[in-house]
Structure formats: structure tokens, C-alpha cells
Image: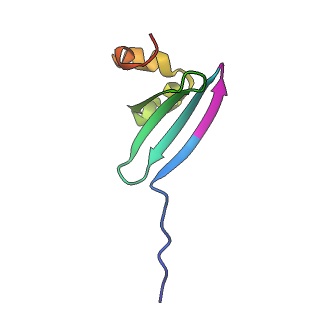
């Protein structure tokens, strides 16, 4: 009998913390979706956005600029 290994559907590709913000780049194997999540460690705010594969590195390193370019800035919990 073969035992099937369950694969974690979401993989953390990169994570960084700076100035009280934690930024995480993830990839979902299930639906091939790349996301960037920003967590404000002081204010307990959280925001997640889907990003294009070819701009994932840029979105991870510059999440607020990427959000503005994608017209998502108005959805950020930070004013």
C-alpha cells in the first residue's frame, strides 16, 4: 500500500520584516496563484493581494507601489 504525501497547498517563497511591517510572498500550488501579504505588526492590520507571476519580486519588495500601480491602494487599510 502506498501512502500519499499531502503537499502543503500554499508555499511561503519569501518573508521580510521592516519598520513594523511583515511582508510575505506566497504561491498556491492548487490554483497557481501568487500573493503578497502585508501585516502591520503594531496595528494588527492585514492586507493580501494577488500579484502577477512576472511581477512577484517587485510586488514583494515594493508592495505599496505595486498596489498603487494596480489601483489597489484605496483598498489598503493604511491611509
- Residue 41: image quadrant is top right
Instruction: Name the colouring of the figure.
Output: rainbow
For the view shown, which residue lies furthest in the front direction?
43
In this rendering, the answer to whether 4 lies above or below 19 is: below
Q: From which residue to which does the magenta span run?
A: 14-19
Q: Residue at x 39, y 33 (%)?
A: 52
For the view shown, which residue lies furthest in the bottom direction?
1
Q: Where in the figure is residue 62, as x and y percent of width and height? A: 53, 20
Magenta region includes residue 16? yes
In this rendering, the answer to whether 30 lies above or below 67 is: below
Q: Where in the figure is residue 78, as x and y percent of width and height? A: 46, 15
Q: Nearer the viewer, residue 71 or 75?
A: 75
Position of 13 with respect to 66 (left or right) is right
Magenta region includes residue 58? no
Q: Main secondary structure of the magenta part?
A: strand
* The C terminus sits in image quarter: top left
Q: Residue at x 50, y 71 (%)?
A: 5
Q: Where in the figure is residue 25, as x and y percent of width and height? A: 52, 37
Q: Residue at x 53, y 28 (%)?
A: 39
Position of 56 with respect to 33 (left or right) is right
Q: Residue at x 35, y 14 (%)?
A: 74
How many numbered discs? 0
Q: Where in the figure is residue 61, as x and y percent of width and height? A: 57, 24
Position of 46 with respect to 61 (left or right) is left
For the view shown, which residue lies furthest in the right direction?
18
For the view shown, which residue lies furthest in the top direction?
79
Amino acid at each position: 500500500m502506498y501512502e500519499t504525501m499531502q503537499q502543503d497547498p500554499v508555499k511561503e517563497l519569501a518573508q521580510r520584516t521592516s519598520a513594523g511591517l511583515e511582508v510575505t510572498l506566497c504561491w498556491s500550488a492548487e490554483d497557481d496563484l501568487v500573493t503578497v501579504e502585508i501585516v502591520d505588526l503594531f496595528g494588527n492590520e492585514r492586507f493580501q493581494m494577488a500579484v502577477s507571476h512576472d511581477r512577484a519580486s517587485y510586488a514583494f519588495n515594493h508592495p505599496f507601489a505595486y498596489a498603487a500601480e494596480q489601483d489597489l491602494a484605496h483598498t489598503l487599510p493604511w491611509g
